[in-house]
């Protein structure tokens, strides 16, 4: 990303995990600069070669906001919103994917390993394979892969599966994603399945499950810092020293179930099971994809609900919902995690959900309760959370009350379980496991 002092690695666990590996191996990061219209020559940042791929403003609209985020994103998340299927958007998606594949083909040394990420680049592996049969190609999908019944709605479904099978290894967050993809390959392309491999067109692609994680040590270090401790106490005081601070942190995305959470909170206040003088909710909603209509609608709905709840239950100077539509510095987020007695994570569907893991990592005090939707990938591992089906109003309300009223002993024992779990697999371990699997796959092929 661009900063006032020039280029710097973007913040975030993925970059932090992969950057050192690339530096050591002398690898290249091929990506978009984040600004349309940029046509920047390759350059180096902190010992890693960066190879920018340009995306025009029009392509941003058609490829990114359009096909990626208004066709694939809703379809891959249980079709929670209607997808727009538009052939101009698809053409732009093909064009940009091909451009990425061409750029990779240009820079990748003979026989090297290429790791392609996420739903915006599902076509790149196929073209890259055609251009460079010598490469070892892996792909990781950060979001769910939908069941065949939904996936087949996509007019260009066969092409996506066919091109993904240009990989040696295709990785998913959960077993369900891997199973759905394998079923799609069988049913749509007539591919054969041999254990965890898919055989098609004379090639063999392995399919695997690699639940992503966070940089646990980094979150713990920030959480333990003096500045964070001070900020955490300050936040509590500013909120009026309530007995329980409930917290939600999400990109403002309709998959994240922010509305469900607000509705449950309002109902609990209404029924007197929560008390506005003792319980407050802080909801951070990070701006995202603001040009896409479904996101504008979602924001309007959430902000109306926040207004209604505050109008009904707040007191002068003491709102009951503290809502920020802002991107906060990461340190501030960690201070908020520490301040949060109960973290509420209620997506309708989520590949993993790193917020749930960051909250647990930040609770170095060993206290705090996580309420977590069964539909987040993180629910497979974080079984010490209060797991809930967020579609069930009553169950969600009960889960929140259970978390708020939980005895200290149980809170501590569950938090210890959560922290043990995330410590076992941090983002570096995740990346190392994927790459070593990719390596072994290539040996067999
Ligand atoms: C996709 C998949 C999968 C949020 N607000 C702020 C902020 N964040 C950071 C969090 C966290 C990240 O954004 C959000 O990650 P999630 O995993 O919760 O969700 P997605 O953005 O939807 O990510 C997801 C993930 O990819 C990885 O594979 O887990 O399922 O949908 O790290 O901390 N960071 C800062 N300020 C904010 O206001 N600095």
Image: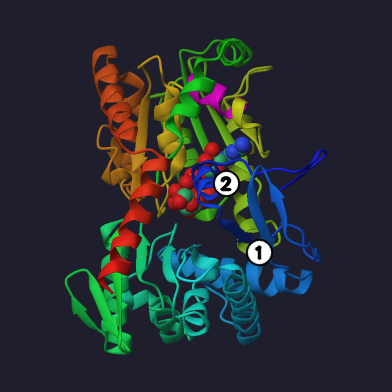
Magenta-colored span: 332-339
x%, y% of residue 54? 73, 68
Q: Residue furthest front?
A: 110
**In this rendering, which labeled residue sits more in front, label 1 or label 2?**
2
Picture mark count: 2
Q: Categorize mark 1 by other alpha carbons within 10 Å: few (<14), some (14-19), many (20+).
A: few
Q: Is residue 340 above or below residue 241?
A: below
The image quadrant that residue 416 belongs to is: top left
Instruction: State which quarter of the image contains the C terminus.
Output: bottom left
**Would residue 4 appear left or right of 291 to someone viewing this image?**
right
Q: Secondary structure at mark 1?
A: helix
Comparing 288 with 169, the one in front is 169
Q: Secondary structure at mark 2?
A: strand
- Whether ligand 1 has any atom under 8 Å from the Cβ at mark 2 is answered as yes
Residue under the image location 20 percent in, 78 percent down: 193
Say whether disc 1 or disc 2 marks the residue closer to the N-terminus: 2
Q: Which residue is mark 1?
A: 293
The image quadrant that residue 78 belongs to is: bottom left
Residue 34 painted magenta: no
**Would residue 395 appear left or right of 431 to someone viewing this image?**
left
Q: Which residue is mark 2?
A: 251
- Dominant SS of magenta comes to helix
x%, y% of residue 361? 41, 27
x%, y% of residue 124? 52, 75
Please indicate, yes or no, whether residue 257 appears anywhere in the rendered image.
no
Q: Categorize mark 2 by other alpha carbons within 10 Å: few (<14), some (14-19), many (20+).
A: some
**Would residue 374 appear left or right of 106 to someone viewing this image?**
left
Q: Is residue 17 above or below residue 74?
A: above
Residue 334 painted magenta: yes
Residue under the image location 37 percent in, 75 percent down: 150
């Amino acid at each position: 990303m661009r900063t006032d002092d020039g280029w710097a690695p973007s913040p975030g666990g993925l970059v932090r995990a992969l950057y050192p590996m690339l530096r050591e191996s002398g690898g290249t990061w091929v990506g978009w600069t984040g600004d349309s219209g940029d046509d920047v020559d390759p350059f180096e940042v902190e010992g890693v070669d960066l190879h920018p791929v340009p995306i025009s403003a029009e392509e941003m609209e058609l490829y990114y906001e359009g096909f990626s985020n208004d066709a694939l994103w809703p379809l891959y998340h249980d079709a929670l919103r209607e997808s727009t299927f538009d052939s101009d958007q698809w053409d732009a998606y093909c064009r940009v994917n091909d451009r990425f594949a061409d750029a990779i083909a240009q820079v990748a040394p003979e026989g090297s390993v290429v790791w392609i990420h996420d739903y915006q680049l599902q076509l790149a592996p196929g073209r890259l394979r055609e251009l460079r049969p010598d490469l070892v190609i892996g792909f990781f999908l950060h979001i769910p892969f939908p069941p065949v019944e939904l996936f087949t709605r996509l007019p260009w479904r066969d092409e996506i599966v066919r091109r993904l099978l240009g990989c040696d290894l295709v990785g998913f967050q959960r077993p369900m994603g891997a199973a759905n993809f394998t079923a799609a390959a069988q049913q749509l392309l007539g591919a054969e399945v041999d254990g965890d491999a898919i055989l098609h067109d004379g090639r063999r692609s392995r399919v695997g499950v690699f639940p992503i994680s966070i940089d646990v040590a980094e979150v713990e270090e920030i959480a333990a810092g003096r500045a964070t401790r001070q900020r955490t106490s300050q936040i509590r005081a500013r909120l009026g020293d309530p007995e329980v601070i409930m917290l939600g942190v999400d990109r403002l995305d309709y998959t994240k179930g922010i509305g469900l959470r607000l509705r449950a909170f309002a109902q609990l206040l209404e029924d007197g099971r929560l008390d506005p003088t003792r319980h407050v909710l802080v909801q951070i909603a990070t701006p995202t994809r603001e040009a896409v209509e479904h996101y504008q609608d979602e924001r309007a709905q959430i902000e109306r609900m926040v207004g209604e709840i505050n109008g009904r239950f707040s007191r002068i100077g003491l709102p009951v919902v503290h809502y920020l539509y802002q991107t906060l510095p990461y340190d501030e987020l960690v201070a908020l995690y520490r301040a949060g007695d109960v973290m509420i994570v209620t997506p309708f569907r989520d590949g993993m959900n790193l917020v749930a893991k960051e909250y647990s990592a930040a609770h170095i005090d060993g206290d705090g309760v996580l309420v977590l939707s069964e539909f987040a990938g993180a629910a497979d591992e974080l079984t010490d959370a209060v797991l809930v089906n967020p579609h069930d109003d009553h169950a969600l309300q009960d889960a929140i009350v259970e978390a708020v009223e939980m005895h200290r002993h149980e809170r501590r024992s569950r938090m210890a379980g959560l922290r043990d779990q995330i410590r076992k697999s941090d983002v570096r371990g995740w990346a190392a496991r994927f790459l070593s699997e990719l390596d072994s796959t290539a040996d067999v092929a």
